[in-house]
Image (cartoon, rainbow, N blue to C red):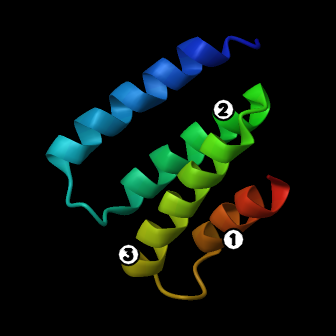
């Protein structure tokens, strides 16, 4: 719908809740960072998008096995930016 600021606000709120409730290397945090990266990417804020995708990848490298498909999602985001 193009309401990027609303989406970003919702994703950031979800991330704040997850940071309180989950361990720092939980895969759900990586998913939230990846979603935030997608919003920034759609907004044309590529530097912020890249930072979010890279944070997502850092968490996934710790939390997931090296051949897990979610790692590809982070790499795809980085490549798209």
Residue 2 placement: quadrant: top right
Residue 68 placement: quadrant: bottom right
Q: Residue at x 30, y 66 (%)?
A: 25
The answer to the question of whether label 1 and label 3 lie on touching residues, with beta carbons closer than 8 A, is no
Q: Residue at x 66, y 18 (%)?
A: 4
Q: Secondary structure at mark 3?
A: helix
The answer to the question of whether label 2 and label 3 lie on touching residues, with beta carbons closer than 8 A, is no
**Disc 1 vs disc 2: which is toward the camera?**
2
Q: Is residue 48 above or below residue 80?
A: above
Q: Residues within 10 Å of mark 2 (few under 14, many from 20)?
A: many
Label 1 and label 2: CA atoms lie apart by 18 Å
Dot label at residue 54: none
Q: Secondary structure at mark 2?
A: helix
Q: Nearer the viewer, residue 23 or 53?
A: 53
Q: Residues within 10 Å of mark 1 (few under 14, many from 20)?
A: some
Q: Residue furthest right?
A: 80
Q: Sequence-wise, which precedes: disc 2 or disc 3? A: 2
Q: Residue furthest bottom?
A: 66
For the N terminus, give its image quadrant.
Answer: top right
Residue underneath mark 1: 72
In the rendering, at what x and y percent does residue 38 appear?
68, 40
**Disc 2 vs disc 3: which is toward the camera?**
2
Label 2 and label 3: CA atoms lie apart by 23 Å
Residue underneath mark 2: 39
Q: Nearer the viewer, residue 10 or 54?
A: 54
Q: Residue at x 42, y 68 (%)?
A: 59
Q: Residue at x 51, y 59 (%)?
A: 56
Label 1 and label 3: CA atoms lie apart by 14 Å
In the rendering, at what x and y percent does residue 41 appear?
74, 38
Residue underneath mark 3: 63
Q: Is residue 76 above or below residue 50?
A: below
Q: Sequence-wise, which precedes: disc 1 or disc 3? A: 3
């Amino acid at each position: 719908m193009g309401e990027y600021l609303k989406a970003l606000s919702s994703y950031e709120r979800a991330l704040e809740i997850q940071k309180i409730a989950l361990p720092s290397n939980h895969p759900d945090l990586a998913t939230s960072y990846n979603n935030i990266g997608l919003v920034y990417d759609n907004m044309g804020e590529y530097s912020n998008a890249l930072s979010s995708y890279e944070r997502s990848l850092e968490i996934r490298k710790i939390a997931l096995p090296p051949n897990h498909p979610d790692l590809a999602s982070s790499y795809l985001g980085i490549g798209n930016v």
